[in-house]
Image (cartoon, helix red, strand yellow):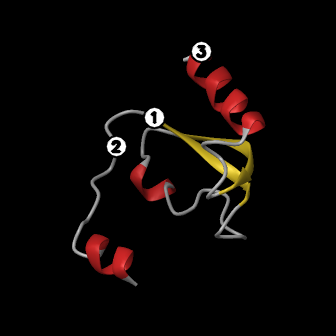
Amino acid sequence: MRNNRLTAPHRAAPAPLPVVLVKAERSLVPGDDTLGWLPLAPHGLTVHLCPGDHYTMLDHPDAVDTIARLLRGA
């Protein structure tokens, strides 16, 4: 609830460039492949899956490897 209160007043503007979304395979929001980012990506949205869940995707070795490959390819 605290996080919701902190972020509720913020309204993100659409990105001026294509957006790359790295989404955890075990998503906190099942059923939405874009996690609500599509309206913010009028110039294109690419979704990549990353091993783990929302909490482990930045420290799980397989997830870090996936993200590092994407960054090297950029």
Tell whether label 1 touches label 2 (CB within 8 Å).
yes
Q: Which mark is residue 53?
A: none
Residue beneath label 2, please?
15
Coordinates of residue 5 in the picture (x, y in percent): 29, 80
Q: Residue at x 50, y 55 (%)?
A: 38
- Marker count (numbered): 3
Label 2 Cα crowd, 10 Å radius (few <14 / some 14-19 / many 20+) = some
Does dot 2 land on a helix, a strand or a loop? loop
Q: Is 30 positioned to the left or the right of 36 in the image?
A: right
Q: CA distance from mark 2 to mark 1?
A: 7 Å
Residue beneath label 3, please?
72
* Quadrant showing the C terminus: top right
Q: Residue at x 71, y 38 (%)?
A: 63
Coordinates of residue 7 in the picture (x, y in percent): 30, 70
Q: Residue at x 34, y 43 (%)?
A: 15
Q: Nearer the viewer, residue 27 or 19?
A: 27
Does dot 1 land on a helix, a strand or a loop? loop
Q: Which mark is residue 18?
A: 1
Q: Residue furthest left?
A: 9
Label 1 Cα crowd, 10 Å radius (few <14 / some 14-19 / many 20+) = some
Amino acid type at circle 2 is Ala
Amino acid type at circle 1 is Pro
N-term mark: 1 or 3? 1
